[in-house]
Image (spheres, helix red, strand yellow):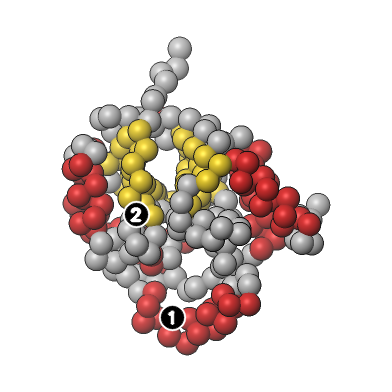
């Protein structure tokens, strides 16, 4: 009979973005590494959990933007955890820079234009060579966690989500929950692909969603937002 794992979820709000620890009490994974020079916040959260930094098996990056992977190198040096990223984002990590995604509304489109002008100044981070590059579903049971990593493109081509016990989805910037009106992200390189990803995630059946920005939200909230996007003409192509 296959072993069952009961996971504890530890959110780490970091101001500009969220990171998360998932642990079975002995082994742990870290989902996202936060903005540059904030690694101490994550180490402090580990110690308060309490989870030893050495318990971190994997540092899973939902994508290669600076506010999600800025501390990747520092945290690998401290914890020994192996860095996991989608194969299409490996070169961004190697270069220590990932371009900003396109805006999905009027304000974010204007900010995208501004970001392309000053992008290097705000988007650079310490380069790092990841340990594991994935293209497909990646099982986490070998690392003591009942779950898997799922490619969820749209925000970026290599965006990833982490599914724990088929109940909890850690979704990076596939969703933003910083507004009372919508969880639709203000930035996405491919909105049609993003909506296909939304349908794929909804079909998984998770009950709770943990975004890279803002508060967790429920399946009911997700369904409401998905239906609203379709009504606005953002239908997923067949």
Q: Residue at x 35, y 70 (%)?
A: 96
The answer to whether 126 appears left or right of 237 in the picture is: left
Q: What distance separates the C-alpha of mark 1 from that of mark 2? A: 24 Å
The answer to whether 18 appears left or right of 36 in the picture is: right
Q: Position of residue 165 (x, y in %)?
A: 48, 30
Q: Position of residue 105 (x, y in %)?
A: 63, 72
Q: With respect to residue 105, does 85 lie above or below? A: above
Bin the neighbour count of mark 2 within 10 Å (Cα to Cα): few under 14, some 14-19, many 20 and up.
some
Q: Is residue 31 visible?
A: yes
Q: Position of residue 203 (x, y in %)?
A: 66, 38
Q: With respect to residue 40, does 221 lie above or below? A: above
Q: Earlier in the sequence, mark 1 or mark 2?
A: 2
The answer to whether 77 appears left or right of 177 in the picture is: left
Q: Which residue is mark 2?
A: 13
Q: Residue furthest bottom?
A: 117
The answer to whether 223 appears left or right of 26 in the picture is: right
Q: Position of residue 13 (x, y in %)?
A: 34, 54
Q: Residue furthest top?
A: 1
Q: Secondary structure at mark 1?
A: helix
Q: Is residue 134 visible?
A: no
Name the foreground residue: 173 vs 177: 177
Determine which of the numbered discs, if any, sits on residue 57 in the image.
none
Q: Secondary structure at mark 2?
A: strand
Determine which of the numbered discs, if any, sits on residue 119 in the image.
1
| Quadrant holding the N terminus | top left
Bin the neighbour count of mark 1 within 10 Å (Cα to Cα): few under 14, some 14-19, many 20 and up.
some
Q: Residue at x 45, y 17 (%)?
A: 2
Q: Residue at x 58, y 77 (%)?
A: 107
Q: Residue at x 54, y 78 (%)?
A: 112
Q: With respect to residue 231, does 27 lie above or below? A: above
Q: Nearer the viewer, mark 1 or mark 2?
A: 2
């Amino acid at each position: 009979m296959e072993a069952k794992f009961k996971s504890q979820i530890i959110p780490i709000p970091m101001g500009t973005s969220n990171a998360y620890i998932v642990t079975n009490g002995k082994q742990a994974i870290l989902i996202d590494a936060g903005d540059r020079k904030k690694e101490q916040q994550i180490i402090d959260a580990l110690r308060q959990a309490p989870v030893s930094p050495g318990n971190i098996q994997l540092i899973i990056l939902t994508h290669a933007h600076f506010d999600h992977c800025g501390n990747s190198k520092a945290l690998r040096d401290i914890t020994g955890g192996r860095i996991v990223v989608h194969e299409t984002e490996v070169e961004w990590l190697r270069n220590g820079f990932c371009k900003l995604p396109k805006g999905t509304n009027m304000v974010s489109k204007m900010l995208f234009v501004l970001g392309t002008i000053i992008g290097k100044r705000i988007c650079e981070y310490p380069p790092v060579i990841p340990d594991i590059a994935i293209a497909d579903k990646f099982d986490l049971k070998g690392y003591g966690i009942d779950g898997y990593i799922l490619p969820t493109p749209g925000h970026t081509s290599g965006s990833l989500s982490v599914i724990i016990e088929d109940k909890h989805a850690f979704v990076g910037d596939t969703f933003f929950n910083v507004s009372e009106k919508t969880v639709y992200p203000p930035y996405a390189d491919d909105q049609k692909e993003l909506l296909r990803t939304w349908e794929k995630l909804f079909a998984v059946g998770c009950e709770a969603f943990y975004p890279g920005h803002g508060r967790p939200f429920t399946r009911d909230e997700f369904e409401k937002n998905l239906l609203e996007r379709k009504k606005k003409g953002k239908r997923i192509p067949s």
